[in-house]
Amino acid sequence: MASEKIKTLTDADFGDSVKNGVVLVDFWATWCAPCRRLAPTVDQLAEEYNGRITVAKVDIDENPMTPGKFMVRGIPTLLLFKDGALKETVVGLETKDKLAQLIDKHL
Amino acid sequence: MSSDRQVIIIGSGPAGLTAALYAARANLKPLVIEGIEAGGQLMLTTMVENWPGYRDGIMGPDLMTELRAQAERFGAEIIQGDVTAVELSKRPFTVSLGKTQYLAQTLIVATGASAKWLDLGVDKKLSGRGVSTCATCDGFFFKGRPVAVIGGGDTAMEEAIYLSKLATSVTVIHRRDLLRASKVMQDKALSIPNISFIWNTEVVDIKDVDKGEVTSLVLRNIQTGERSELAVDGVFIGIGHVPNTALFSGQLAMHDNGYLKTHDGSRTSVSGVFAAGDVQDHVYRQAVTAAGSGCMAAIDAERFLSGTLHESSALHGAPA
């Protein structure tokens, strides 16, 4: 089960949701096997950084606009925003330690 | 530091999980460290039609889910994480995951192989921006667009066939004038109208890094040296695999191509360390051969622990 600390974003609310603070967004789809592999790592980050950053997910099947806008052409892709600006892009699988280092750079 | 394990298995593809199944049933309480590509290459495939016992085939991820549950049923412990270092100069061996360390009396290396990239540099820069090694993951983004597949083996044909249902056209670019793929896959790919082939040709550049997306490929005919450009929105690389052996560099003997050397079954150059699956097999590379060698490694580890594995080879000892 996904952590309840993870927000689900849509095309409608995406822009407003990444405006403030550090937001890590996981672009995924139900049929994407590597996305399922990455999910527990994203869950753990949501727990560990609870209150300090926002961790969110976008289902690309239901929300085609947002991945198009940020030129996401493969999943899983993680985008890290700070105060609305895109700071980091991680394509494919990555370890929790490496992702934590990326997040820490922007805190 | 946690207490000694009888067996630690690195990797969770068909080799690692079959080793775990056998080791668990031998009551060795194996610890499996699944790795960043948990489940292995089968997690990225669709229908597996050559795994014995499934006459209608089985989906790769479903097969791995079953195998994992089967190993766990007999007591295998499977943990997330990617091994960062191993120390094989003395037993018990040390296996590190960042700051966490595990000790093992025996080790089974089943780290497999990962998709090979082109040696262009640009392909990695455009990864997730139109360059992919996984059609089932990223094909979705190329619905109604032209794509290319690089390679002539089974992987490339599987990607081309999958993509032909989504993309407007699939152009397969191959360095030779003959496919290496199995007859079944060749026939399937050659019969699909929107798959075309460019022979004797290599990719020398992918455009456009500045735009941050794929717009075209620069091709070079190997026989004539003639260059051309092919406009595509996506390119899928299916040129084979490289073994995941960097962790063992200087500690386990390897062939020139980086695959681990094994002898007398699954033994490596270090006594008590065994290898199974694609990490030591650049010849067969099948799910079922990986599983078979995983079984061999577990039996060898069990015999080693009980003192009944006969040391027969001069290779035993320090890495070659």
Image (cartoon, rainbow, N blue to C red):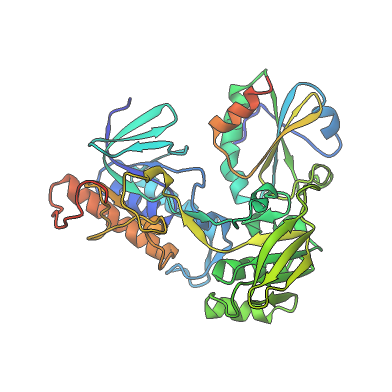
Relative to the observer, which residue lies in front, B154 or B253? B253
Q: Position of residue B244 (x, y in %)?
A: 45, 50
Task: Say whether residue A5 is left or right of residue B113.
Answer: right
The N terminus of chain B sits in image quarter: top left
Task: Say whether residue B70 is left or right of residue B140.
Answer: left
Q: Can residue B10 be seen? A: yes
**Residue visible at 70% across and 59% down in the picture:** B205
Residue B194, quarter of picture? bottom right
Relative to the observer, which residue lies in front, A7 or B82? B82
Q: Is residue B3 above or below residue B289?
A: above
Task: Say whether residue B200 is left or right of residue A7.
Answer: left
Instruction: Please tell me how many numbered marks the rendered image carries.
Output: 0
Q: Position of residue B138 (x, y in %)?
A: 69, 54
Q: Position of residue A101 (x, y in %)?
A: 59, 27
Q: In the current view of this chain or complex, which residue is farthest to the front?
A: B225
Residue B228, quarter of picture? bottom right
Task: Say whether residue A98 is left or right of residue A10.
Answer: left
Relative to the observer, which residue lies in front, B200 or B43? B200
Q: Can residue B162 be seen? A: no
**Residue visible at 66% across and 70% down in the picture:** B173
**Residue visible at 57% across and 76% down in the picture:** B185
